[in-house]
Image: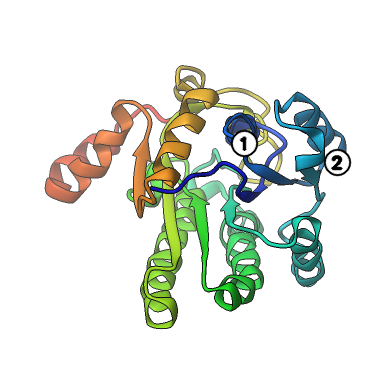
């Protein structure tokens, strides 16, 4: 079982929602934190709210879609504490629009932020982990990485892609370092965060409202506690949420029944 006390954890998307809650939970457990997101002022706020010593928390503003900047930023992140033990790929945006109404540029943006951002950052940190022959990579996907729902076609596609990449990566790393580098896929369901406020609509504009499922979802604090426990146990894949998590198993074992249910599900 992994002890996260004094471990160096790099969290992307740390300025709000699950990333913010993870920062507080890991800080409480004694981790050293590297916090990244686009908004420096929000990272400063999260840092000041953490319970750990402020010298054990660093901020590194970044946009995961600025791929050319990631090599330099990764080196900087490693230099702050001398190494990274755990990378949590948590940056992401959501979607609320039907496929027929969604511009292709919006689908591309979803893939850039949710998929290519995580893949690019992971590829930049991998040499560091391989050199030290240890490390842990976590990626926050979604239960929609296991099944698609109406109104989220591009979002679900980006999350499915993450599962394909990180499952493959886990298997490949075994050839290099056996089980020394862990890969965890974290799949939240409805969690009460601001993510739907900035969810993109068909033309790329923000939704600017909270949908019912998200509003009634579990708290981000509760979710963060579940995620940290899964990381401590070095779980390969974990589903976190309410009854929507049952959809993963319904899809797996009773796909026709699931298909009939999901087509009429209230998802907005």
Residue at position x 44%, y 29% in the image: 190
Q: Is residue 230 visible?
A: yes
Residue at position x 41%, y 34% in the image: 189
Real-space Cα separation, disc 1 to disc 2, in angstroms: 23 Å
Tags 1 and 2 touching, CB below 8 Å: no
Q: Which residue is mark 2?
A: 40
Question: Along the line of sight, which residue is nearer the eye, 137 or 252?
Answer: 137
**Residue located farthest toward the top when viewing the structure as drawn:** 216
Mark 1 vs mark 2: give the one in front.
1
**Residue located farthest toward the bottom when viewing the structure as drawn:** 175
Question: Along the line of sight, which residue is nearer the eye, 27 or 216?
Answer: 27
Element on which disc 1 rests: loop
Q: Return the x and y of residue 218 as percentages of the image width and height.
A: 45, 22
Rendered view: 28 above or below 94:
above
Rendered view: 79 above or below 15:
below
Q: Return the x and y of residue 230 as percentages of the image width and height.
A: 40, 42
Q: In the figure, residue 150 lies in which quadrant?
A: top left
**Residue located farthest toward the right when viewing the structure as drawn:** 41
Taking the image as shown, residue 200 lies to the left or right of residue 184, namely: right
Q: Which residue is mark 1?
A: 30
Rendered view: 91 above or below 175:
above
């Amino acid at each position: 079982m992994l002890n996260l006390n004094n471990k160096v954890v790099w969290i992307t998307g740390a300025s709000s929602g699950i990333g913010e809650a993870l920062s507080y939970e890991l800080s409480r457990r004694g981790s050293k934190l590297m916090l990244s997101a686009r908004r420096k002022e929000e990272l400063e706020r999260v840092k000041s709210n953490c319970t750990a010593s402020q010298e054990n928390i660093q901020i590194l503003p970044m946009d995961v879609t600025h791929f050319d900047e990631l090599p330099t930023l990764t080196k900087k992140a490693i230099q702050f504490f001398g190494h990274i033990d755990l990378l949590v790929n948590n940056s992401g945006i959501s979607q609320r629009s039907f496929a027929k109404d969604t511009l292709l540029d919006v689908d591309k943006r979803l893939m850039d932020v949710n998929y290519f951002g995580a893949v690019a950052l992971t590829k930049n940190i991998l040499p560091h982990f391989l050199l030290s022959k240890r490390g842990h990579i976590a990626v926050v996907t979604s239960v929609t990485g296991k099944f698609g729902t109406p109104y989220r076609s591009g979002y679900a596609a980006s999350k499915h892609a993450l599962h394909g990449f990180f499952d493959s990566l886990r298997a490949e790393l075994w050839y290099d370092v056996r089980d020394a580098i862990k890969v965890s896929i974290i799949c939240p369901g409805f969690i009460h965060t601001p993510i739907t406020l900035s969810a993109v609509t068909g033309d790329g504009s923000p939704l600017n409202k909270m949908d019912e499922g998200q509003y009634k979802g579990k708290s981000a604090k509760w979710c963060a506690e579940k995620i940290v426990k899964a990381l401590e146990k070095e779980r390969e894949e974990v589903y976190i949420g309410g009854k929507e998590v049952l959809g993963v198993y319904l899809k797996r074992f009773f796909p026709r029944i699931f298909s009939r249910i999901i087509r009429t599900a209230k998802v907005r």
